Amino acid sequence: MNATADGRFPEGTLLRVAAWTLALALVALPVVAVVNGWIGAERWPLRKLRVEGKLERVDPKRLREVLLPYARDGFFAVRLGDAQAAVARLPWVDQAEVRKRWPDVLEVRVVEHRPFARWGESRLLAEDGRVFDARGVNVPKSLPLLDGPPGHEAEVMALYGESRDLFARTGLDVRALRLDRRGSWSLRLSNGVDVVVGSREPRARMGRFARLLPQVLAQPAGEALRRADLRYTNGFALTWGEATASAPAPAQATGT
């Protein structure tokens, strides 16, 4: 464009610039409107929801309810990131991915948490060692109860597995295992016996007790074994009385 001697552009040039600007706006505005969902949602609607994988614990009805507000924006305007975040907040969802497929499909892939145990009062422990919120979740009653300070999940899982192997030889299962903040261990067996292990050499102590437990249970004491305290160098202390198998909570350990 050539300016006049006084620095102004000719009137015709300004008109052409204005015309080009208007033309570009007329082309761009519909695109912006479609992308933002101002128009086009009825012309390019999302009509189908496709779920990849089998849902075992995530509620399909709740999944549809969460995605519906985003699907209403249409194919071009759907906010996939927001939709994905909404799905990820549902109970039992470990990972979520939301995509769109031309011309009218909203596709969601959900990876569910695989529960390993209950963790404390209101959470669950997944098989990969991560803790997740159990609120709004139908917790399987068969899950054991584990607990420990934050960051000790893997340690608790490992000792739980070892303790199960030890007591399986006696025909009993470990229904609860707890590590307190002082590092002391306690557990509960499937027959209701509370076992205080302590903090020193927990594997060795449990191993000695498991080897002798069949003999202990075979004693004609007249009462059921209720509690075993393994915090002794050369033995353990036993408490006899009425069995309490109906309350699967780990014993509270004190001392070492």
Image: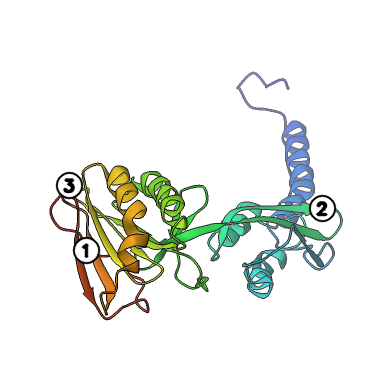
Q: Is residue 151 left or right of residue 235?
A: right
Q: Quadrant of the N terminus?
A: top right
Question: In the depicted view, which residue is nearer to us: 84 or 115?
Answer: 115
Dot in front, 3 or 2 = 3
Question: In the depicted view, which residue is nearer to us: 9 or 105?
Answer: 105
Label 3 environment density (alpha carbons within 10 Å; few <14, some 14–19, many ≥20): few
Q: Is residue 21 left or right of residue 119?
A: right
Asked if marks 2 and 1 touch (Cβ < 8 Å), the reply is: no
Question: In the depicted view, which residue is nearer to us: 84 or 199?
Answer: 199
Which residue was labeled with disc 2?
A: 101
**Disc assigned to residue 234:** 3
Q: Residue at x 30, y 53 (%)?
A: 209
Gap between marks 2 and 1, in whole Å?
A: 55 Å
Q: Which amino acid type corresponds to the residue marked 1 in the rendered image?
A: Gln
Whether 147 is drawn above or below 154: the answer is: below
Q: Which amino acid type corresponds to the residue marked 3 in the rendered image?
A: Asn
Gap between marks 3 and 2, in whole Å?
A: 69 Å
The quadrant in which residue 132 appears is bottom left
The quadrant in which residue 84 appears is bottom right
Q: Position of residue 18 (x, y in %)?
A: 73, 41
Q: Position of residue 133 (x, y in %)?
A: 44, 63
